[in-house]
Image: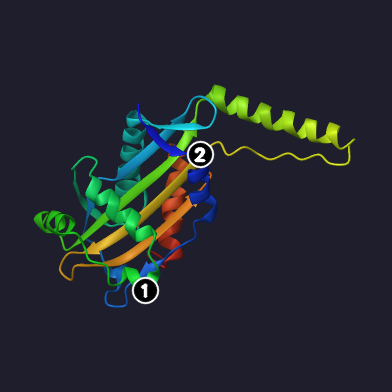
Amino acid sequence: MKKFLSLLLIIGLCTSCKQNIFITNDVNVQEINDVVLIEPQTEIGLITKGNNVFANDSLSDVASRNLEKILTYSVRHTHVTSIEHIGQNQEINNFIVHLSHMQKNEIEYVTIPSFIDSLIESSGKRYGLIARQSGFTRTRWNRTAQVTKAVSLSVLSAVLTLGMAYVYVDPIVAVSEISLAIIDSHENKVVFFNMVSTENEPLDETKTSKLIFNLFEMAGIGKN
């Protein structure tokens, strides 16, 4: 197993991340109704001891299947009519991460990697939906240990301050970050992008479905 990300970095991504909704003015996104879904890209880590996060391929595979199911069947906004199964692809991962760090006015002019553009065109579609989920979860034992530790620290703070202060901080037990983008392969540009970071369980299909639904709803897509 390889180290995934430090917990502090992941928490920083979660707490500092803001909505970054982008919709092009050149295309009426609400009228897009024939989209190819590129196999969702996922990086899910597992904490078994302390706060050390390690990449977990099995959990990442489960997350990818969940996203595919949600984006194909559960969320009406996507209008997905076909799927391109390509496995986990570093170029697509890097591109979505790149988008997540850009300002809205920069996304409009970003260059679409030729691989992604060709992949969409080869499917016979004009529009392609790419999705990425990253985050971590904990084992049940580790989760219990973190809660116990938080309670112990709060009691200690009360003892040391003679009851003047009682500080309890809920431990972060999970993080889920989801990014979605629709690519126009004819114009070679991003026509929609949105993302969110939450302290949700990344493998909770119901919560993930709600997050994705909200990402489209907040952008005004699918309200008609």
Q: Which mark is residue 7?
A: 2
Which circle's residue, 2 or 1, is located before the other in the chain? 2
Question: Which residue position holds label 1?
Answer: 105
Q: CA distance from mark 2 to mark 1?
A: 31 Å
Mark 1 lies on a secondary structure that is: helix
Residue 92 horizontal/vertical position (percent): 25, 51
Q: Return the residue nearer the eye: 118 or 30.
A: 118
Q: Is residue 223 above or below residue 66?
A: below
In the image, residue 109 sits, relative to residue 55, either above or below, namely below
Mark in front: 2 vs 1: 2
Image: 24 above or below 41: below
Q: Kindly identify the residue that appears in the image at 55 percent across and 36 percent down.
A: 173
Q: Residue at x 52, y 45 (%)?
A: 11
Q: Is residue 180 visible?
A: yes
Label 1 CA crowd tier, 10 Å (few <14, some 14–19, many 20+): few
| Coordinates of residue 119 in the picture (x, y in percent) | 14, 54
- Specify whether 128 is left or right of 196: left
Residue extending farthest top: 141
Residue, x 65% and y 30% (percent of image)?
147
Badge 2 element: helix
The answer to the question of whether label 2 and label 1 lie on touching residues, with beta carbons closer than 8 A, is: no
